[in-house]
């Protein structure tokens, strides 16, 4: 069942389309009548004018017809351009509304899941006398769920600051490889899906960066590769110096990203399909943050297909050597 806002939006588009067609039809109709009227006036003037003046009458008539047709064409072109722009804006608004709806559904699910897990673990510990080993296991699980919540809240806050140009960061000289290794070791236990991670990190590659946002960039790329890497994801993270730049690559062997969505995936809230039927978790802000954080570090973001299947995200950081 469609929501009231979607029905109202479609009704607005239909009314606007009908109005635009009517205005264009009326413009063409009145242009035709003006040309026809000038034709009748030309015939009357030709009949009244002497032979020597008929050439001047014809010249005046031609100028008026040319002026009417020219102004009509310009007006129709400007009107058509305005209609096209308004329709594009309506489409963008419709897409934004759909993405925001998906985000609200996704964020609700993402928040409820860890909260429900933590509550279940704590209720179990309160109602049962558990061995020490089981208590530690439950506490570790609760800690992991808390870290997931913390990561989610941090993503939302940072993405909002990035969007509003209010995130400036504290830039310092960082050794990149230990940062990546720490993120992988810390985040690996938070994923429910079993996966294999291969690290190929050159040591001693330093860059001027904000540690917190850089950790978020690596974390979101890593999480994205696991989510969309198939049933048993294989993720490869490499760090190399290439052509004077420090290149971070995160590759997966999942189904990959269709060519018509490679630009869309970096938009805020964008996720393929509908949130009502989607099986993969997420909020649609991870890759948006990756793009904005790369931009903050003056880095180039490249998305390419992995072979034989999958996706490769590469961040090319400039160096000051």
Image: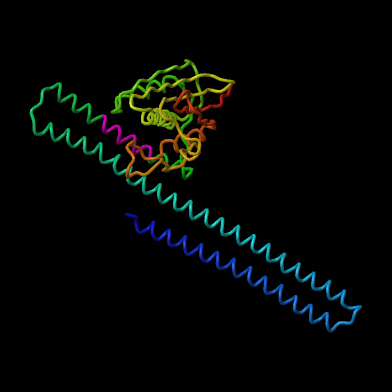
| Residue placed most toward the observer, 50 or 252 | 50
Which of the pair 146/313 is nearer the observer?
313
Q: Position of residue 68 (x, y in %)?
A: 72, 69
Quadrant occupied by the C terminus: top right
In the image, is 108 to the left or to the right of 97?
Answer: left
**Residue at the location (8% across, 28% down)?**
129
Q: Quadrant of the N terminus?
A: bottom left
Q: Main secondary structure of the magenta part?
A: helix
Tell which residue pokes out farthest to the bottom in this image. Answer: 48
Where is residue 221? Give x, y as percent: 42, 30
At 64% from the left edge and 72% from the top edge, which residue is drawn?
A: 30
Q: Position of residue 151 (x, y in %)?
A: 34, 34
Which residue is more in the foreground, 171 or 9? 9
Q: How many marks?
A: 0
Colour scheme of the rendered structure: rainbow
State the residue lying farthest toward the top: 203
The stretch of residues the image draws in magenta is 144-155
Relative to residue 269, is residue 176 depicted above or below?
A: above
Residue 52, percent from left and from top: 91, 78
Q: Residue furthest right?
A: 52
Q: Which residue shows up at 45% across the image and 62% down it?
A: 12
Residue located 52% across and 56% down the image: 87
Q: Is residue 152 magenta?
A: yes
Q: Quadrant of residue 186?
A: top left
Q: Quadrant of residue 36?
A: bottom right
Q: Quadrant of residue 195?
A: top left
157 is within the stretch colored magenta: no
Residue 295 placement, left or right of 222:
right
């Amino acid at each position: 069942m469609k929501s009231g806002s979607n029905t109202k939006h479609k009704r607005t588009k239909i009314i606007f389309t009908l109005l635009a067609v009517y205005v264009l039809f009326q413009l063409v109709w009145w242009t035709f009548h003006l040309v026809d009227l000038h034709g009748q006036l030309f015939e009357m003037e030709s009949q009244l004018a002497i032979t020597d003046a008929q050439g001047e009458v014809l010249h005046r008539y031609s100028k008026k017809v040319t002026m009417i047709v020219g102004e009509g064409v310009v007006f129709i072109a400007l009107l058509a351009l305005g209609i096209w722009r308004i329709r594009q804006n309506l489409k963008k608004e419709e897409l934004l509304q759909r993405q925001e709806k998906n985000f609200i559904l996704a964020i609700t699910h993402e928040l409820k899941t860890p909260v429900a897990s933590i509550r279940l673990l704590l209720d179990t510990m309160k109602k049962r006398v558990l061995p020490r080993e089981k208590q530690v296991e439950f506490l570790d699980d609760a800690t992991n769920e808390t870290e997931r919540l913390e990561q989610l809240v941090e993503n939302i806050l940072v993405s909002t600051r990035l969007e509003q140009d209010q995130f400036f960061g504290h830039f310092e000289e960082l050794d990149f490889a230990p940062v990546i290794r720490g993120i992988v070791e810390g985040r690996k236990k938070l994923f429910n899906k079993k996966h294999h991670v291969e690290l190929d990190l050159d040591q001693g590659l330093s860059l001027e960066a904000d540690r917190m946002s850089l950790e978020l960039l690596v974390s979101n790329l890593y999480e994205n590769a696991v989510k969309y890497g198939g049933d048993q994801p294989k993720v490869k993270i490499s760090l190399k110096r290439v052509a004077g730049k420090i290149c971070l690559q995160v590759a997966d062997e999942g189904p990959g990203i269709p060519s018509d969505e490679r630009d869309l995936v970096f938009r805020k809230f964008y996720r393929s399909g509908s949130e009502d039927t989607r099986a993969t978790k997420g909020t649609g802000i991870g890759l948006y943050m990756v793009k904005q954080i790369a931009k903050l570090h003056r880095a180039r973001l490249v998305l390419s297909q992995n072979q034989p299947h999958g996706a490769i995200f590469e961040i090319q950081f400039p160096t000051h050597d």
